[in-house]
Image (spheres, rainbow, N blue to C red):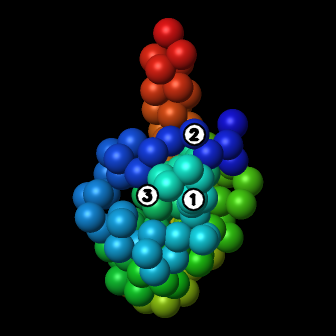
Amino acid sequence: MWCTRDFTMAEAARLAGIHPVTLRTWVMNHGAAFSERRGGRRWFSPRDIAVIAAARELADAGMPVPDAIDAACRLLADPPAADALALASGRSVRAAGIADLVKARGAAIRSVPIGRIAAGISANCAELFQRAAA
């Protein structure tokens, strides 16, 4: 289900915590990276929605949106471990663990809990999918 594109743009925006107009803008500029056009609509997978949510966090940490989207796509190619982190500093980001975060204390680095983001998105998508099927 991680890569199955069953969610509309409105659902994706709500699940990712991003304004629909912002998502529309991101899709116009970077849509091929995290959505699919089918039947005149855009469709998103749990992975796509997690990419959007993680990219928003990375952009909030100061990373330019195109770089944030590229980094989130790389980091979320597969479902991450629940405790996975991304360390963001300006234009760079890397996957990390708790030990890396402790070493980076005091630096201008922001940790983004990509594992928790992905797990939350997956759970919310599964719940929404089950409600629709009922």
Q: Which residue is mark 2?
A: 6
Of the image marks 1 and 3, the number of the one nearer the N terminus: 1
- Name the residue type under label 2: Asp
User: Can residue 3 be seen at all in this image of the molecule?
Assistant: yes
Q: Amino acid at mark 1?
A: Arg
Locate residue 82: give its quadrant.
Answer: top right
Q: Residue at horizontal 53%, vertical 70%? A: 31
Residue lying farthest to the bottom in this orientation: 91
Residue at 65% across / 59% down in the picture?
76
- Foreground label between 1 and 3: 1
Q: Is residue 97 visible?
A: no
| Residue on which disc 3 sits | 53
**Mark number for residue 45?**
none
Q: Earlier in the sequence, mark 2 or mark 1?
A: 2
Q: Which residue is mark 1?
A: 37
Q: Secondary structure at mark 1?
A: strand
Mark 2 Cα shell of 10 Å, populated few (<14), some (14-19), many (≥20): some
Please provide percent x and percent y for residue 32.
60, 71
Q: Is residue 70 above or below residue 42?
A: below
Residue 18 as seen in the image, left or right of residue 5: left
Which one is nearer the viewer's eye here, 33 or 64?
33
**SS state under label 2:** loop
